[in-house]
Image: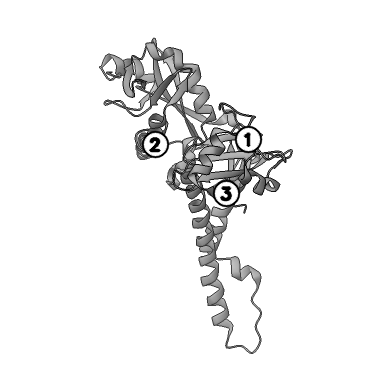
Amino acid sequence: MSDKIKLNVTMTCKADSYKQANNLCIVEEIVPIPDVDFLEMATYPCMDNPHITLHKDSMFADNEAMHCVLFIAEKQGDGFLVECEGYDYARYSQYIPHAADIVAGQQRRLSEASEKLYAALDRNLTFLVNESRAEPYYKIPIDAVFNTPEIQEGLLDVAREIIAEHAEFADIQLTENDHIVTIDGDKYDTLRFISPLRVDTDCLIIKTAVEPEDALKYATFINNELDADIMLSVHYGLMEHCSDKTLIDKVYSVFPSVEKINGELVGVTEVKLTKPLDEQDMDKLKAFVTEQYSQEWGKRFYDNGLYYGDDRIYVGFGNSDDFQLIPEEDWDQSQGEGLALQQ
C-alpha cells in the first residue's frame, strides 16, 4: 500500500496567479521549511530557491502524474506544491491552504488501517506459535496465519484504501460480500437536495451579505472553484471525509454545487447511491452533510473566501440561520412555507 499523498490540482507554469483543474499530482516528499522561507518561495515562485534545488531530484513528470514536493510552512501550516522540471525554481506550482492538516489526516487514515492489520496478525501468529510449541517439530500453514475474521477484515480495509487511492479504480468497489465489482455510473440512484446559500462580499474587511438573486453572477465561478477544491475528492466528494460504515456502504459520492432556481442562487447537494437509504440512513446522511457544511469543509470554504477579480467573496453552504437540506421535489413548497434564506 502506497503512503504517498495524491492530490488533484493544477500545476501552473511560471505562476503569478492560481486557478485549479483536475490534474493528478503525487507528493514524493513532504518538506517542512521555516515560515519566512515559505513566504519567500510563495511570493517569488519564479526565483531560484535553495530548498527547491536541494529536493529537485524528487520532482519529475511521467504518463501517470506530476511527481512533486510539498513544502509546508512549519508554523503557519499552508503548503506550496512544486514540480520544478530540473530547474531551481517552481516551474510548476500550486498554493495549498491548510496543507499540514491535509497531511495529518492522510497519515492518520493510513496508520489506522496498518495498525489494525498488524495487531491482528501479531495476535494470531503468537497464538499459533504458542499452541504448537509442545511439538518437537511443527509447521504452521500460511492459511492458518491469515484465515481469521479479524485479519480478513483488516485486509479488506487495506484493499478499500488502495481502491480509494487509485483514480483508475473509480469505477469499482469492494462489496460487503468481499467481491470487487464494476459500478456503472449510469446506474447510480441520484438524490438532489436544495438549501439556502449565503454569499458575502467584503468591504473594508466587513462581510456584507449579497442577495440571492444578485449572487447569480458568481454561479459559474463558484462551481469552477468547487471542481478544483482539493478537499473534495475527485470521485467521492465529501464522502472522502465520512467514517460511518453504513453510509460508506450505501453512498458513493456527495458533491456540493450552486444553481439558479426560481431566480435565485441556491446550494445543491447531489448524492449518488449504490444502495437504497432507509429513514435512519437518511437522517445520518443529512447530519453528515450538515456537519460538513457548517463545521468542517464548508467552514473552511467560507472562512477563506475566494478572489473574484478585485472582489473577495465568501460562499456559505451551511451559514444561513434556517439551513435545511430539502429534497429537490419539495423545494418550491418549502419556499412557500417561508423556509428560504432570509438575508
Q: Mark 1 and mark 2: span between their CA atoms?
A: 39 Å
Question: Which of labels 3 and 2 is toward the front?
Answer: 3
Amino acid type, callout 3: Ile
Crowding near the residue tagged with mark 2, few <14, some 14–19, many ≥20 C-alpha atoms within 10 Å: many
Q: Is residue 157 above or below residue 267?
A: below
Q: Is residue 288 left or right of residue 237?
A: left
Residue 43: % across, % down:
54, 33
Does the rendering let one see residue 27?
Answer: no
Q: Mark 1 and mark 3: span between their CA atoms?
A: 21 Å
Secondary structure, mark 3, is strand
Give the numbered dot on residue 30: 3
Residue 243: % across, % down:
44, 46
- Residue 89 position by quadrant: top right
Residue 159: % across, % down:
59, 52
Amino acid type, callout 2: Gln
For marks 3 and 2, the one nearer the N-term is 3
Q: Mark 3 and mark 2: span between their CA atoms?
A: 27 Å
Residue denoted by label 1: 47
Question: Which of labels 1 and 3 is toward the front?
Answer: 1
Residue 30: % across, % down:
57, 49
Residue at 39% x, 36% y is 292
Residue denoted by label 2: 292
Secondary structure, mark 1, is loop
